[in-house]
Image (cartoon, helix red, strand yellow):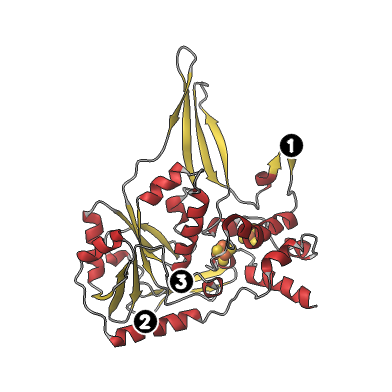
Amino acid sequence: MKMECHFIQSDQLQKLLDNLLANGYVCIGPQVRDGAIIYDEINSTKQLPRGVTDTQAPGSYTLNNNSSDKYFDWANGPQAIKPLLFASRESLWQSEQSVNGQISFITTEPILKPIAIIGVRACDIAAMKIQDQHFLQQQFVDPYYKIRRDNLLTVAVNCGCPAEMCFCHSTGDGPFVDDGADVVMTELDSGFLISAHSSQGEKLLKGLTLQPVTQRQIEESETIRIKSSKQNKNLPHYDIKSRLFNALRDEFWHEIATKCLSCGNCTAVCPTCFCHNETDVAELDGKSSIHYRQWDSCFSQGHSYIHGITIRSETSQRYRQWLTHKFSSWHEQYGRSGCVGCGRCIAWCPVGIDVTESLANFEDRRRG
Ligand code: SF4
Ligand code: SF4
């Protein structure tokens, strides 16, 4: 579809929210909570983190006030939009035994109102596209993911403030959104550039006071894009996929295991990780049970427990599994790496392990 760009004044952001609410959407947007920017329900632009920015470093994240009047002058916090599509814990079915002993299974597919997420960044749109590949594969569609995905509308905001940990430019996933969102905005000093990327997005724009875009506004947006693309962290340029597959016995895995706590924080904050486990919780009367699915991590002992043994009992094996899956075997499954360069696993690793440095280490060894 032809994507026409318009300009809206800042006050139109509240109008956009009002239109979504009037059309039955639950609006989710960024807001400050417990010292971080997270996504939760929102009905007013006053709830947005205006005048707030962040400082990130390996193992460190802090919010600061800044002098800007912008609503989106910050980089992504710990929470991706992943939990809104792939719930961290949900029941997949219930079973019940009737008085005559028959067991019946009851589906627990969620009944949801449509959700609109405001302020999604390019890296999270890219991660959503990866999760779509995983959960909506033609013959294996996950109905729980699908029902949420079918009811989702995304209003993305191009990133004008990447953190020190971001490297979306080198993975090709940001800082500006190419496709995958319904509406894309760029925040300028005086308002927003806005364009619809789907028919739902077009409908949403019809309720706003749209103005033509000036050359000066286009130039301001381009300046933001160029500045945001200059990121300090990068993926190394060697053939990561083959190099990691050929390094399964490398001493690096033992070196990194002396630091790594196997805590699984990196997988919890990662917007593309989809590992989970399933468990049944039975009622004490033995007449009913609920089957739950919940997030798991390749860093947990139980995740590789099969038939009485834990396949990856050592932290070195688990870190190797994580890195080689993300950057090697993911290519075979989904035609690209499993990393969108959001940097969350670096900022939220309690000991500050940096995935770009882990990968650069293999480049150094090749040279050496
Ligand atoms: S591996 Fe790290 S940087 Fe890459 S997508 Fe996951 S959390 Fe983000
Ligand atoms: S790399 Fe960091 S976040 Fe991930 S399991 Fe190890 S210590 Fe935890």
Residue 195: x and y in percent read 31, 70
User: Residue at 35% across / 80% down in the picture?
Assistant: 68
Residue holding disc 2: 221
Q: How many marks?
A: 3
Q: Which is nearer the eye, 202 or 255?
A: 202
Q: Secondary structure at mark 3?
A: loop
Residue 252: x and y in percent read 77, 66
Q: Secondary structure at mark 2?
A: helix
Q: Earlier in the sequence, mark 3 or mark 1?
A: 3
Q: Earlier in the sequence, mark 1 or mark 2?
A: 2
- Per the model, the C-alpha gap separating discs 1 and 2 is 57 Å
Residue 133: x and y in percent read 51, 54
Find residue 176 and report its image quarter.
bottom left
Q: Earlier in the sequence, mark 2 or mark 3?
A: 3
- Per the model, the C-alpha gap separating discs 3 and 1 is 44 Å
Residue 361 seen anywhere in this rendered image of the structure: yes
Residue 288: x and y in percent read 48, 24
Amino acid type for the residue under numbered disc 2: Ser
Q: Quadrant of the N terminus?
A: bottom left
Q: Secondary structure at mark 1?
A: loop
Residue holding disc 3: 75
Residue 348 seen anywhere in this rendered image of the structure: no
User: Residue at 47% across / 33% down in the picture?
Assistant: 93
Find residue 12 and report its image quarter.
bottom left
- Are dots 2 and 3 in contact, CB under 8 Å? no
Q: Which is nearer the eye, 336 or 170?
A: 336
Residue 308 image label: 1
